[in-house]
Image (tube, rainbow, N blue to C red):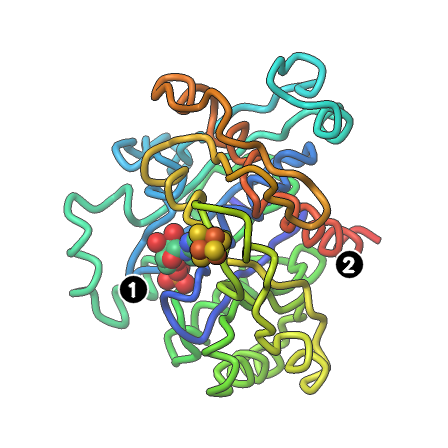
Amino acid sequence: MSLKDVKHIVLVLSGKGGVGKSSVTTQLALTLSLKGHSVGVLDVDLTGPSIPRFFGIENEKVRQAPGGWIPVPVHEAQNGYGHTDGNGDAAHTNELADGRGSLACMSLGFLLGDRGDAVVWRGPKKTAMVRQFLSDVLWGSLDYLLIDTPPGTSDEHISLVETLLKEATPEQMAGAVIVTTPQAISISDVKKEINFCRKTGVKILGVIENMAGFVCPNCSECTNVFSKGGGQVMAQEFDVPFMGSLPIDPMFIRLIEEGKRPVYPEGTVIDGRAMQTNGHADLDEAEKAGLLVEKYTACSLYPLFDGMVNQLLSKVEP
Ligand SMILES: Nc1ncnc2c1ncn2[C@@H]1O[C@H](COP(=O)(O)OP(=O)(O)O)[C@@H](O)[C@H]1O
Ligand code: SF4
Ligand SMILES: [Mg+2]
């Protein structure tokens, strides 16, 4: 049983594609790892398996072992990371003192030669693949398995969740995080997702509103003007926990696409924390040095995820 030693399973859901489901999955994984948890990410979004790209491991291949597939490692566990990292400032050093958990991924993207192949798959083949994904990956022992699901509330979606519920024990199924955007909220796309969870008996851990506001890469003048996306109001209306809003941060995209450590204009403050400024970061090599998980701690979205992951942990491991 591939999920036997997985403690908690969290689904990441959205009613539509392009709202940031994979970005959120990626950042939840990085932040959980930074808190010392061992994490696996399973990408069953067969419509566009983008997890390998987010973790910068697109060219990796999954190895087949006698008992199943071996997930692709992103980084190994490290103890006392906070004490050894010369780049960490004092504030981060404390948080990281417990060390970093391992992170590994499994995605259909690894098994496809050409990304375009995914779209030609039809229903039964997809369901069979999803079942195999759930049962044949050698995760080993994990604190958290995050599952990036296909967008929507279709039959295929329901069958995926049903398959999952069969593979996992009720104790393992922590619940779902729903990702939406200010635009999507208005078309009651979230409502469908909430009904979907209620229908399939999956607990809703919270709703995240993504792309509300903007972190400008040019100056800090209007960066802190977070647009009121209505996420909080919506969550109250549907009686689900609201985890928080995330702005669009071009530095996050740059980190994913170019592997460069995020840097911000002088005076950029996010959630009470001053962001690292441009300083001497024009050297390409210096900007690219380090692991993704280390560079991510400089991203404006990290303090926001840190808060959201604390909320999540308090619900999953009270
Ligand atoms: N908060 C954000 N800041 C900057 N870029 C973002 C943010 N959220 C998502 N993106 C970008 O938007 C695009 C779509 O996001 P993605 O996570 O792939 O959506 P989905 O998985 O829901 O289809 C990606 O290129 C991603 O990097
Ligand atoms: S933060 Fe500065 S550069 Fe960016 S849009 Fe506002 S005024 Fe313009
Ligand atoms: Mg995606």
- Seen at 67% across and 85% down, the residue is 238
Q: Position of residue 172 (x, y in %)?
A: 67, 55
Residue under the image location 64 percent in, 82 percent down:
234
Q: Describe the element under mark 1 as helix, strand or loop.
A: helix
On whether ligand 3 comes within 8 Å of the CB at mark 1, the answer is no
Answer above or below: position of 203 versus 87.
below
Q: Which residue is mark 1?
A: 126
Measure the alpha-carbon separation of dots 1 and 2: 32 Å
Looking at the image, residue 221 sits to the left or right of residue 203; the answer is left
Cβ of mark 2 under 8 Å from ligand 1: the answer is no
Q: For mark 2, what is the residue? A: 315
For the point 61% across and 57% down, the residue is 224
Circle number at residue 242: none
Name the amino acid, label 2: Lys
Of the two numbered discs 1 and 2 on the same chain, state the one appearing first in sequence: 1
Q: Is 47 left or right of 249, judged from the image as shown?
A: left
Q: Is residue 44 visible?
A: no
In the rendered structure, the answer to whether residue 22 lies left or right of residue 305 reads left
